[in-house]
Image (tube, coloured by chain):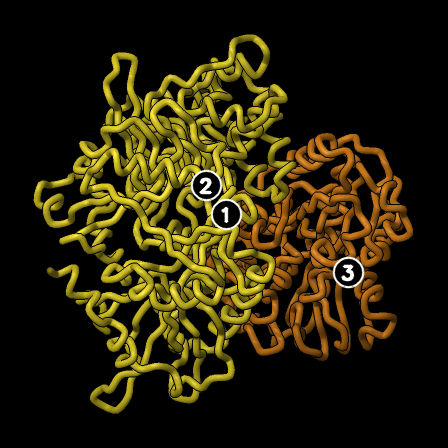
Chain colours: A yellow, B orange
Amino acid sequence: MNRFAELLDRLAYEPGRNNKLRLITGYFREVGDPDRGYALAALTGALSFKHAKPALIRDLIASRTDEVLFGLSYDYVGDLSETVALMWPKAALAAHNNPPPPTLTEVVTTLRTLGKTELPKQLERWLDELDETGRWALLKLVTGALRIGISARLAKTAAAALGSKDPHEVELIWPGLAPPYLDLFAWLEGRGEKPVNRDPAPFRPVMLAHAIEETDFQNLDPADYIAEWKWDGIRVQAVAGRDEHGHITARLYSRTGEDITGSFPDLVPSLRLAGAIDGELLILREGRVQSFNVLQQRLNRKVVSPKLIKEFPIHLRAYDLLGDDENDLRELPFAARRARLETFIGKLGDPRIDLSPTVPFASWDALTAARADPASAGAGEDADAVEGVMLKRRDAPYLPGRPKGQWWKWKRDPHIIDAVLMYAQRGHGKRSSYYSDYTFGVWTAGADGDELVPVGKAYFGFTDEELLQIDRFVRRNTTEKFGPVRHVVHEGDKGLVLEVAFEGLQRSPRHKSGVAMRFPRISRLRWDKPPRDADRLETLEGMLKAEVAEIEA
Amino acid sequence: MRPQDILLPAAAGLCCKPGGFHIDPVRPVERAVITHGHSDHARAGHGAVLATQETLDMMRLRYGENFAGSTQAIRYGEEIRLGDIRVKFHPAGHVLGSAQVAVTCKDTCIVASGDYKDAPDPTCTPFELVPCDVFITEATFGLPVFRHGDAADEVKKLLASVALFPERAHLVGAYSLGKAQRVIKLLRQAGYDAPIYLHGAMEKITHYYQSRGIDLGELKPAAGMKKAALAGTITLAPPSATSDLWTRRFPDPVTAFASGWMRVRARARQRGIELPLVISDHADWDGLTATIAATGAGEIWVTHGQEDALVHWCKSQGLRAQPLDLVGYGDEEESETPLQGEAEA
């Protein structure tokens, strides 16, 4: 475990892709089976065990340290696992016969079988046995928060480099492999046959789009592209395949390859033709696409009740076909895959799965008009669920990752308001010890004239340079402190105006203002604007429109 | 006599009224007693300055000949009377020439420890524990997350990285006074005998260390070296230089930073450090608490850094404790701004 922790530690600081690869490949070369296999699983997000809750970690540290000192430390460090790893006081162990620190394999295999009640004692033992870096890595691992800036793709590329193989080869057999990947490493080291992918319904790594910029259009020919609506749902891959007995297995994957079939049992019966569909998960009521706010009611549910299924009927809108029965279509150009998709959906003939229509256009101006008004460009009553258009090259094969110049997303302009900074709080993680969480408000009529009412909170959207500027402003203009929260001056002629961009609004009884924003972020700092000229609550209420009624319906 | 009648915080710094002097004043005063040569403690423009020979030399290097009206050198263990007050200097183990100042009036002894560390340092006299009634302690690393470990292990990490990336240069950010020389000496003790390169800003002070009999091996200026010739080498530079244009003269540099702040990952990442080295010239949490307990002092005054946590700890141990309201030594707000407060830690 300590050796794996050391790798994670180095990776966390290393910015260069090639140096990261060198570090990981070096680790695979140096460390034997099965530890390196579990490391590969950890780096690719393929480990599965029940994660420990942060509350459990808090209880552990509370039993060993002073509560006030822990509070001050956590506020300073800004990361629970790291704070605990750093301040963990080891139990006084006997000087001899100390158990050796656990190996990664030991940790992973123990966690898989450990009962909930045994977990705290086991964690405590490990924390005593490991060094600081080991404790940090262990806590990140057990809480499922192993974010170290490594993509699964990069880890697989590092593994491929061990045997000088093309990473794409590893990618293709990956769905059939399982930790600790003994067969994979045997093949990579020339000791065994190439493993075969036997999963009947494997996930295919998804292809992603770049956001298009104004300046990109001049180099693009409209004739090379097919346009579709960009739906405001969630991207999924619906795969069905026959196992060795000829039975159909169906699975629904998120864009990261997470199996989310369990959350959408109502879609499974519709996936009865062998194939792999790339599409958008939506809620349809009486044939009409509902907003993302509505879809949200079905996300991340552990229990899917019949009531939920009835009230929020799930739907798949298909836009690509990656596999048709036994045939892998990914090498075909998009136009050919689209034709196969249309045939496939027609053959399937299922009301829960339909085709995402293309948007015909002859020039970029025509597409600009369609994007500005989807309702009259074919989206009809579904226009509210359109968040822009997608452009896909007719000749593009389906390539995993985000290849340049193949797919573009062109979102509709976000909503924008000017709000006033009211409170600031220190950030976590990368931004710990900077004031980087901002609560902002807009004007409304109060008992004693106009007053600011908080309407949202944003943590990003600004550059590092802007962060320093806001941080300085907060420190110099604090009027009161409540624990980690600073009350920042906000009067008609004193304060900072933030331009806030957001994707949507919904009514919220939990907020004092009565509205909640979706995906708010700081788009600009308006040092030039006096707070009194910031927007009013009425402006937001005007934007609310009918979206709200849908959820309550 | 009450301790606050002997020493009291004032705008210019810690003031000893009966003795007629200030300790580490941040504004020009008539008579100043200086604990060590770092610029936030040792400022120019005082009437008379009492300090160790090394501290006086460092002030002269930084500010020129006329940095004070008059100077007086004092040795460790030496005692001087100023009115009713006796002043005695003891090693603080922070940097070369650093001292704790014991101020005694009748039978009450207050130790103003300045910046100190109880960890071994081959470039200065080790910290000496001074029993006292009131102990004034710094709190730069006054949180239990700060545990510094063995500096020799951190230097091993640096050498392992040099071995792993022989085609790259290693740039080690380190405060020019004290930290840089300690890192060089630790590299030598770890058996590294290749020339070590220096940023121009640290040549003068490093040569001063050598002139005081501290053997640092072969040192060369980084300026004027061909880029390719710096592959596989180690260069020491002030922390601010490791993130500016100056680094372009090095082949694909690995940026390291030797500082106690490197214990916290976010701090290293915020500065774009690839190789954090936890090497500090301040006592860590265990050092602070052990020292406080060992002085036998019943009352603790806590200054610059994380006062809250250390005051809380003292009280939980049954000691009287209070934060001392002193400004100008990298207070909490400042120490959060990466490029200033951290530079010295």
Mark 1, residue position:
A393
The residue mark sitting in front, 2 or 3, is: 2
Q: Secondary structure at mark 2?
A: helix
Residue situated furthest right in the rendering: B224
User: For residue B135, which quarter of the picture?
Assistant: bottom right
| Residue ID at (86%, 49%) | B222
Marks 2 and 3, how far apart at CA: 74 Å
Left or right of B269 in this view: B216: right
The residue lying toward the viewer, choosing from A199 and A420, is: A199
| Residue ID at (57%, 22%) | A28
| Residue ID at (69%, 34%) | B161
Could you say where residue B160 lies in the image, as x and y percent from the top left? 69, 31
Marks 2 and 1, how far apart at CA: 7 Å
The mark that comes first in sequence, 2 or 1, is 2
**Around disc 1, counting alpha carbons within 10 Å, would you say few (fewer than 14), some (14 to 19), or many (20 or more)?**
many
Left or right of A237 in this view: A288: left
The subunit carrying tag 2 is: A
Mark 3, residue position:
B55
Look at the image and tell me in which quarter the C terminus of chain A lies: bottom left
The residue lying toward the viewer, choosing from B80 and A146, is: A146
Could you say where residue B5 lies in the image, as x and y percent from the top left? 53, 73
Q: Assess whether mark 1 and mark 2 are in contact (beta carbons under 8 angstroms).
A: yes
**Around disc 2, counting alpha carbons within 10 Å, would you say few (fewer than 14), some (14 to 19), or many (20 or more)?**
many
Q: Secondary structure at mark 1?
A: strand
Mark 2, residue position:
A334
Whether B337 is drawn above or below A539: the answer is above
The residue mark sitting in front, 3 or 1, is: 1
